[in-house]
Amino acid sequence: MPSQVHVRKDALAEAEIAENGGGGLAQGAVRLEIESFSVTANNITYAVVGDGFGYWNFFPVRGDVSGDKGIVPMWGHARVVESDCPDITVGERVYGYLPMATHLDVVPGKISASGFVDMAEHRQPMSPIYNQYSRLAADPEHDPAREGERMIFGPLFKTGFLIEYFMRGEAWFGAGQAVLTSASSKTALGLAAVARHRSPGIKRIGLTSAGNIDFVTSTGFYDEVKAYEDVASLTTVPSVTVDFAGNAGLLAQLHRHFADELKYSCLVGATHIEERGAGLGGAEGLPGPPPTLFFAPDHAVALFKELGPEGAGRQIAESWHYFLEAVGGTVAIERHQGLEAARKTYLEMLAGKVDPAKGIVIEP
């Protein structure tokens, strides 16, 4: 029986498995059987900001009249098991945005050899970036030997790529160093790697918990790695901060430490859920520039508009291969079977209990 993991929107630690009920296939629709997806801090951010950014709207819980339950989006692979679309055949595989579930129905449109867009009515108000599915048989990014890495790092890496592209376009706001919080997170690693590749003149400083210092240092992506307790020791020079942690107290400390030397304060995620404060760690009345939220889909649209699909794709691919080569064996991929494993991993990720040296793939 098709199943899903339902999460209470106002109590994210309450998650349960529920049967979906299946049902008939709508006209023109395709039923996907989900083969695998990764669970990362990115998924926690989707849940934390779900109402404000519409992430709960991608995969609504059928029959939930109260609207208090949601399904956390994931990135992963699926196989077509039923099709009422003449251009999509049973058996072909796709990669894209999936629910924490065993199945998903989509309505393919704008179909090409390399992909399609889900035209389901409820998904149209959201960013088109999330509605695109790659058909693996003709997908230039697909590498059968790297499917795990693509799920774990791909979306997070692209966010890091877009942050670097944005910062470089602004000449890093005149700063000489970038301070990244939650430096062990996959998105921070992606940004640090791309910055090393494309902005080597910017000093990269990673802030992390004391227990993660050795891991973060071992990646080689940072020029300097410090514990959160050592913020006061950071050199006070023109800097930008990129906050992946969403820890309001840490963000305030950084603003006060750098004061007028802080040239830009970028908010990206919320890995420290219990300390995120208002929004994603936004702060009022602090010295320096106001913290500004980075919404990756908007920047992705701008990137493709500026460089065109081929130019953007080429730059992303170059940095992606550079990142994969550099990340090497620093992250070990673990695979777990069943939706219960997905539920448990989600809760562990929510509580910050997952070792950053592990990349977790679920095969529901």
Image (cartoon, rainbow, N blue to C red):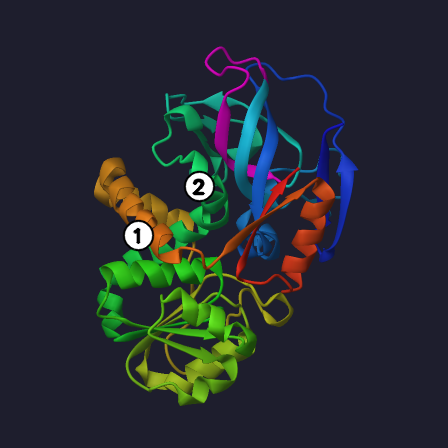
Residue visible at 37% across and 30% down? 139
Residue visible at 31% across and 58% down? 194
Gap in Å between the C-alphas at discs 2 and 1?
Answer: 14 Å
Would you name the residue on which mark 2 appears?
Answer: 146
- For the record, the magenta segment spans 82-99
Place of residue 136 in the rendered image (x, y in percent of width and height, measured from the top left): 43, 28
Q: Amino acid at mark 1?
A: Tyr
Place of residue 39 in the rendered image (x, y in percent of width and height, measured from the top left): 58, 50
Check the image and report above or below for 213 versus 149. Answer: below
Residue 150 visible: yes
| Residue with the most extreme top position | 86
Place of residue 76 in the rendered image (x, y in percent of width and height, measured from the top left): 53, 39
Q: Quadrant of the C terminus?
A: top right
Q: Is residue 17 left or right of residue 240?
A: right
Residue 283 visible: no
Place of residue 304 in the rendered image (x, y in percent of width and height, measured from the top left): 29, 42
In the rendered image, which quarter is residue 164 located in? bottom left
